[in-house]
Image (tube, helix red, strand yellow):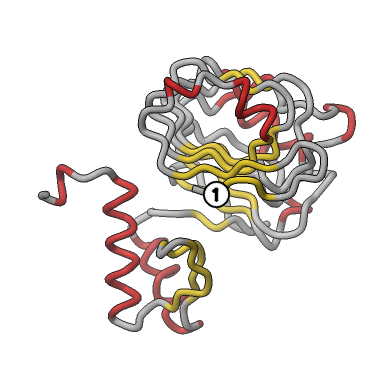
Amino acid sequence: MMMEDRMMEDVARYCIEELIDRSLVEAVRTERGKVKSCRIHDLLRDVAIKKANEVNFVHIYNDQLLSTTCRREVVHHHMDSYSCERRVNKRMRSFFFFGERNRTLWGSVKPITLKLELLRVLHLEGLHLPDVIGEKLPAFISNLRFLQTLDASGNDSFRKVTDLRRLTSLRHLMGRFVGDLLIGDAVNLQTLRSISSYSWIKLKQELLTNLRELEIYDKSSFGLVCLL
């Protein structure tokens, strides 16, 4: 199969394996033959960041440097000082939060995500949703209709109904879903991780024709039941 005919996830996997074979990247964790995490030498990391900045591929936020044009933003070491209301980058396609889960940052994140209509990737691992939201995924996320990847796995269980039926482009969904999960037209969904056995039974499984990765947990103990 020609490279241009392959799914983008397969192309990405091929590229990372090439880097590993060339000893440029080291695989740290693998599952079922697939690389799940990797690391690189500090020097190579510095070179990669410098090149990414030169071509405006990704912007790594710090409290001195802002970007209004880059389509990918990463917030890591300066999460406490991050304020999404300083500027609105409507071109943004990917938004990543890493590091320790932060309870104070949510107030500044919500306004910006409401305006990012073209967002494709939303990674909330380092962002702790406040208690006022309860055990429910924030409703505004369902308005990000072009969203392809949603990772809320760093948060507690979502025990209430999660309605993602408007996200028809969704390809990868990660989060501790315990209550009813409404996906709707899920033909594009490839990854579904940390779903409870109850939520899985309630899903219209016949619609998940392209599902490639599945993690099911017991609802009560959240112990692993199924891994595909």
Looking at the image, residue 200 sits to the left or right of residue 38; the answer is right
Task: From the top left corner, tell me how far across and down residue 9 is, in percent.
Answer: 34, 48
Residue situated furthest left in the rendering: 2
- Residue 195: tell me if it is visible: yes
At x 50%, y 54%, the residue is 59
Examine the image and state in which quarter residue 113 appears. top right
Looking at the image, residue 124 sits to the left or right of residue 149; the answer is right
At x 67%, y 34%, the residue is 197
- Residue 91: tell me if it is visible: no
Task: From the top left corner, tell me how far across and down residue 107 is, in percent.
Answer: 79, 34
**Circle count:** 1
The residue nearer to you, when weighing 65 against 39, is 39
Q: Amino acid at mark 1?
A: Leu
Residue situated furthest right in the rendering: 131
Residue to which mark 1 is pinned? 227
Task: From the top left corner, tell me how far across and down residue 91 is, in percent.
Answer: 44, 34
The residue nearer to you, when weighing 170 against 179, is 179
The residue nearer to you, when weighing 205 against 84, is 205
Task: From the top left corner, tell me how far across and down residue 13 is, in percent.
Answer: 33, 58
Q: Secondary structure at mark 1?
A: strand
Examine the image and state in which quarter residue 142 appears. top right
At x 68%, y 43%, the residue is 217
As drawn, 86 above or below 199? below
